[in-house]
Every structure is written in structure tokens, then in C-alpha cells.
Image: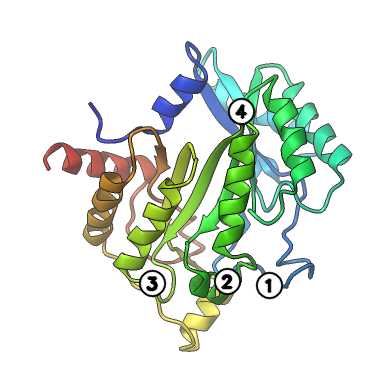
Amino acid sequence: MKAYKDFSDYMAEKFPGIKVQKISVNAGFSCPNRDGTIGTGGCVYCDNTSFTPGYCFNSGDIRSQLEKGKLFFNRKYKNMQYLAYFQSFSNTFGRSIDELRKMYEEALSVPDVVGLIIGTRPDTIPQDVVEMIGGLNAVRPVIVELGAETSHDSTLRLINRGHMWLHVEDAVNRLSQAGIAVGLHLIMGLPGEDETMQLETVRRAVALPIDSIKIHQLQVLKGTPLAAKIEGGELTVRQYTLEEYIQLCIKIVRIVPRHIAIERFVAVAPPSKLISPKWGIKNYEFTNLLNNRLRNE
């Protein structure tokens, strides 16, 4: 038996008997710490273009993006069903509840789309939106993924997140009470954090009523405020070696209960954007290394 529940296990539980693939959607959202609602500049490490697939740019409406995504994946996988993944920026922010409902329903109306994943911030999901998503979830499965990043408020201020850990706890609890599956995103290696702080974040996260977590190493990307602050000597970050990060992930696996899925351990930015860490390894290659190490523990 695997040492932890992974994404494929999680999807097999939610969609028994079928294979599902995520298709990212760029619906033109922004974030409150970008547009001046609570701040400007965004999170110091953020470059959304580093992880948004090419078919999400200049691709027209939501339906068009999903159809292009289906064509891309249909070349490799047959008889696949799909999850519309509202990925870029905060996908519950800055739109009326009717606009949000229309977007989500448009995605669900596309043939072979069997559910939604909505990525957003914990401070941009008011109760009326929770209830609307709960209504959709009663018909088709919906997962809400919240960018938490860390449980330490001092770090959240340092990286310009614009929310605190209490917002994470509040959003998770309200979504869970509405019967909606919740995932949390966490970043390892943020400025000022040591291993004790990082593992404390994992413990606090899995103590909440969540269904999954996504973990990745902090990546320093060209053109971000983080890169400028490091170059200017304002911030320093730990430069994990691949082996050090594998050891950290082994400790994380031991903390996460079996009922919570660990969807990923690393992020991989385009080499042209990446300053550090330069491991030269793909997501699946890291996962294979980690799983081999866990089997031999």
C-alpha cells in the first residue's frame, strides 16, 4: 500500500469507475491584493503565467478553453472525463454571485465535464458564494482549493498575502459545513520559516476538515517582487537541495492522515522563468523518487 493517498486515489473515490483529467480555465479574475482592494503588487512570489497552460491565453470564453483543453488531452487519453479547473488568480473574487454562477454553469454544460475545481483565496468566499457553490455541488462534484501557503501570520504579512490564518480556518469550516470538498495549498521554504514552522503549518492544516493538500517548494521566479527583494538583500530564502526537500516531504507524509490526499509535492516553472531551485526534475520524477524512498524507509 502507498504511504499516502495521492490525487489518483482521491479522484477514484470521488468519481468511481471513470478517469478524470483537470482542464485549466482562465476566466479573467484578479486578486484583492493586486487590484487595490486590500493592496497592490500581489504575493511577492507570484507569476501566474508560470503555471497557466498556453490554451488559457487568448482562447476566448470558458467553453472554448475547455474544448481546446479536451482536444489537447484527447490525443493522449481516450474515454476521459474532465474537471473544469478555475485556476488563475482568485476565482470567486470581484464578480457578482450571478456572474459566478453563470461561469460555473457554463463550464458544467460542456460535454464530458463532470465537475469543477475552484481555486481562490480564503478571504474572498463570502457565505452567499459558499451557498451557491453548495447548490452546484448537490448536482455535480465541486472542490474548492484555497491558497493558504502558511499558518504563520508573520510570514503571510511578509509575502503580501493580505489575509491571516484565521481567514483560512473560517473559510474551510464554512465550506465543509456546506458539504463542499476543500483543498489547501501550502508552500515550503517561505522567507523566515524554518522546518519547525513548516511542519507546524502542515499539522494545523490537516487538523481542519479538509480533503486534500497541495505542497510545493518556493520557487524564485524572474520579474517577481521576491526576486527583486532577494537581489536587494531585503529577503533571504533557504535554498533546498533536492535531497533536503525529499527528506522534508517524507516528514510531511508522516504527518498527513490517510484520509487527506496529498495531490502534489513540487511545482515546476518554465526554465526561462526560474531562478531557483534548479533541480532539473519533473513533477512525476520527483514523486517517483519520493515514493521509492518511502518504500525503503
Say which residue label 4 marks.
Answer: 83
Crowding at label 3, few (<14), some or many (≥20) Cα neighbours within 10 Å? some
| Element type at mark 1 | loop
Q: CA distance from mark 3 to mark 1?
A: 22 Å
- Total marks shown come to 4
Amino acid type shown at disc 2? Val
The residue at the far left in this view is 296
245 to 154, vertically: above or below: above
Figure quadrant of the N terminus: top left
Say which residue label 2 marks.
Answer: 44
Q: CA distance from mark 2 to mark 3?
A: 15 Å
Q: Residue at x 49, y 41 (%)?
A: 209
Residue 258 horizontal side relative to residue 105, left or right: left
Q: CA distance from mark 3 to mark 4?
A: 34 Å
On the image, the x and y values in percent for residue 169 come to: 56, 53
On the image, the x and y values in percent for residue 179 come to: 61, 30
Say which residue label 3 marks.
Answer: 193
Q: Quadrant of residue 50?
A: bottom right
Amino acid type shown at disc 1? Gly
On the image, the x and y values in percent for residue 198 come to: 36, 62
1 or 4: tag closer to the N-terminus: 1
> Of tags 2 and 3, which is closer to the observer?
3
| Element type at mark 3 | loop
2 or 3: tag closer to the N-terminus: 2
